[in-house]
């Protein structure tokens, strides 16, 4: 199937939705919709609300391009709807999406695959606020949100844990803070694309990721060849261990004083951002894959039973 046929594929770009990352998803979705139109597809934009099932049943798209981020769109829920409707879709399937969104369970998968991860534990929100669960410095974050939503960095020597916001879940992940450089690798099908070095003003949080000028990306990363090779290998192994499909992006911390042994895998994102400041499109572009080609590849890769 392809956009070169006489009748172009009808692609529904799913965006928005009810998660904490709605605005980023709307931005991603509009960029992807425009690129897919440029590539020759018949594109409709769908804000994924509670009427999603009936809307897709009425529209009958050939493919759904999933540009949703966060819960509901990235955790297996929408994937289940699309399986039920029998509409081929992009990115990972039900199980891999659910596993990757659950940070603690995905870390167990990574550990079984022999991948280096940081020490962490799941505790009640009240416990995390009452006393230090791990030696400082450490990070407190939701176990099942993405893109640095609700992340607290507890500095070394802090007397007390922070008071967490009311919208933090009842259970949170407390994870040892890893010093060093922030790096990321995109996997496209069975291929790791490149390593990006991420420089931000302070902690690489939600604003650093998504606000223009919040961070600076260097691709390819200026790192030793063995570190680059290890990051690429770990990202592909993480993608496969979770059973992912399509595009994923795996984030790392690297303590350069310890060479290859200083690399730690943070998490795998099954639906990386697709905005003008996003990391995965930059890596594709570095390899000569235009944004339109990148999006079109995902459409052609779409299927059910992922």
Image (tube, grey):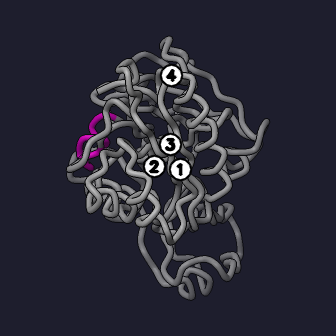
Where residue 129 sits: x, y (%)? 62, 83
Sequence-wise, the earlier of marks 2 and 1 is: 1
Q: CA distance from mark 3 to mark 2?
A: 14 Å
Determine whether label 4 and label 3 are within 8 Å by CB. Answer: no
| Quadrant housing the N terminus | top left
Magenta-tinted stretch? 236-244
SS for dot 2: strand
* Marker disc for residue 178: 1
Question: Which one is closest to the eye, mark 4 or mark 3?
Answer: 4
Question: Which one is closest to the eye, mark 2 or mark 1?
Answer: 2
Sequence-wise, the earlier of marks 3 and 2 is: 2
Where residue 238 sits: x, y (%)? 31, 43
In this rendering, the answer to whether 86 lies above or below 216 is below
Q: CA distance from mark 2 to mark 1?
A: 9 Å
Q: Is residue 132 magenta?
A: no
Task: Tell me if mark 2 has few (under 14), some (14-19) or many (20+) residues whose alpha carbon lies within 10 angstroms of its own.
Answer: many
């Amino acid at each position: 199937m392809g956009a070169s046929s006489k009748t172009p594929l009808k692609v529904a770009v799913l965006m928005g939705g009810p998660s904490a990352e709605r605005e980023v998803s709307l931005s991603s979705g509009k960029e992807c919709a425009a690129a897919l139109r440029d590539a020759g597809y018949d594109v409709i934009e769908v804000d994924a609300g509670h009427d999603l099932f009936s809307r897709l049943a009425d529209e009958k798209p050939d493919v759904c391009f999933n540009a949703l981020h966060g819960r509901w769109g990235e955790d297996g829920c929408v994937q289940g709807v699309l399986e039920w409707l029998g509409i081929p879709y992009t990115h990972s399937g039900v199980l891999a999406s659910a596993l990757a969104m659950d940070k603690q369970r995905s870390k167990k998968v990574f550990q079984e695959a022999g991948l280096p991860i940081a020490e962490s534990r799941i505790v009640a929100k009240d416990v995390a606020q009452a006393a230090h669960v791990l030696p400082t410095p450490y990070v407190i974050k939701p176990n099942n949100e993405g893109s640095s939503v609700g992340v607290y960095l507890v500095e070394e020597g802090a007397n007390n844990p922070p008071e967490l916001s009311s919208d933090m879940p009842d259970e949170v992940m407390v994870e040892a803070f890893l010093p060093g450089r922030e790096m990321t690798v995109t996997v496209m099908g069975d291929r790791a694309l490149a390593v990006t070095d991420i420089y931000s003003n302070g902690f690489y949080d939600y604003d650093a990721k998504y606000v223009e000028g919040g961070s600076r990306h260097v691709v390819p990363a200026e790192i030793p060849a063995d570190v680059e090779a290890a990051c690429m290998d770990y990202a592909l192994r993480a993608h496969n261990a979770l059973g992912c499909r399509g595009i994923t992006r795996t984030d790392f911390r690297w303590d350069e004083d310890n060479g290859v042994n200083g690399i730690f895998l943070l998490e795998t994102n099954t639906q990386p951002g697709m905005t003008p400041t996003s990391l995965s499109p930059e890596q594709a572009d570095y390899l000569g894959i235009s944004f339109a080609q990148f999006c079109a590849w995902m459409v052609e890769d779409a299927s059910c039973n992922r």
